[in-house]
Amino acid sequence: MVDDSPDYYRFMKVAGDIFKTGAKRLGSAHNSVAICSECAHILWSQGNSRAAIRLEQLWDDFAISRNVHLLCGYPRHSFEDESGRHVFNDICAQHSTVYLR
């Protein structure tokens, strides 16, 4: 984080290292990696919705450049009020597919 927002270069370095470790452990028998991120929800719960949306954008950029499936979890109650629904729509817009449970 730099100035309360995810830093692009730091994020890509850390995410790249996580991806390489996971891909190496999988070996050549598998051709994709699933990454579960709960960091954006932490930012959202701290009132930093702008940083949460930015983090979702960074994960999406990262996933496009590799064969990665992203799993991002948010408690549904986080988005019950009007401002929460707006942020929820912004977060969903960062991804190609959204599953609600």
Image (spheres, grey):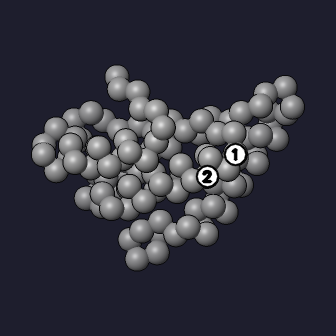
Q: Residue furthest bottom?
A: 3
Which quadrant of the structure image shows residue 29? top right
User: Which disc is residue 66 wearing?
Assistant: 1
Neighbour class for label 1 at 10 Å: few (<14), some, many (≥20)?
few
* Residue 38 placement (x, y as % from top left): 45, 44
User: How far is the residue under mark 2 from the one under mark 1?
Assistant: 7 Å
CB-based contact (under 8 Å), mark 2 and mark 1 = yes
Viewed as shown, does residue 79 lie left or right of 97?
Answer: left
Look at label 2 and name its amino acid.
Phe
Q: Is residue 60 above or below residue 54?
A: above
User: Which disc is residue 31 wearing?
Assistant: none
Which element is circle 2 on?
A: helix
Q: Residue at x 59, y 35 (%)?
A: 69
Residue indicated by mark 2:
62
Which element is circle 1 on?
A: loop
* Residue 87 placement (x, y as % from top left): 26, 49
Neighbour class for label 2 at 10 Å: few (<14), some, many (≥20)?
some
Viewed as shown, does residue 76 lie left or right of 38?
Answer: left
Look at label 1 and name its amino acid.
Arg
Q: Residue furthest left?
A: 82
